[in-house]
Image (tube, rainbow, N blue to C red):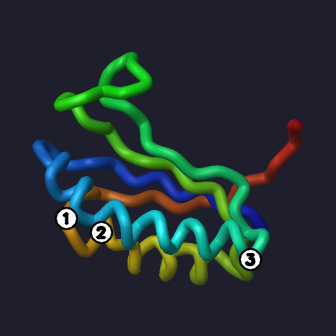
Amino acid sequence: MWYAIEGFDGTDVLPKRVAARPEHLARLVSLRDEGRLLLAGPCPAIDAEDPGPAGFSGSIVIAEFASLEDARAWADADPYVAAGVYARVEVRPFRKVLP
């Protein structure tokens, strides 16, 4: 089943985000290569493709896992969690309808 994982950035965490990004992306590439990633990306903190020093308000990942528990375990192991980028993470089931 698909699961939506939404991480919400804490305050002034852009340097931590930048430092943890390579490890974070490597995990997403693994999901993609396994055919389990629907989409992933950051949410700019301002209305701009490149928010610069404003940074990001969080990230969204929609990926396939065997269970909600597996999705939560994967989210809890994210390098952004370990680095203190995310203030909180929400994981919930997702049903793709379109496209």
Residue visible at 37% across and 66% down? 22
Q: Is residue 2 above or below residue 51?
A: below
Three-letter code, disc 3 = Glu
Which numbered dot is residue 34? Answer: 3
Label 2 to label 3: alpha-carbon separation = 23 Å
Residue visible at 71% across and 72% down? 33
Q: Which residue is mark 1?
A: 84
Looking at the picture, how far across and down is residue 2, in whole percent? Answer: 74, 63
Residue visible at 87% across and 37% down? 98
Badge 1 marks a residue whose secondary structure is loop
Badge 2 marks a residue whose secondary structure is helix
Label 2 to label 1: alpha-carbon separation = 5 Å
Three-letter code, disc 2 = Val
Are the residues at dot 2 and dot 3 in contact (C-beta closer than 8 Å)?
A: no
The quadrant the C terminus occupies is top right
Which numbered dot is residue 52? Answer: none
Q: Earlier in the sequence, mark 1 or mark 3?
A: 3
* Residue at the extreme left of the image, as rendered: 12
In this rendering, the label closer to the viewer, 1 or 3: 3
Looking at the picture, how far across and down is residue 4, in whole percent? Answer: 61, 56
Residue visible at 72% across and 55% down? 38
Looking at the picture, how far across and down is residue 39, in whole percent? Answer: 65, 51
Q: Earlier in the sequence, mark 2 or mark 3?
A: 3
Q: Is residue 37 left or right of residue 7?
A: right
Q: Is residue 4 left or right of residue 97?
A: left
Foreground residue among 63 and 1: 63
Which numbered dot is residue 81? Answer: 2
Are the residues at dot 2 and dot 1 in contact (C-beta closer than 8 Å)?
A: yes
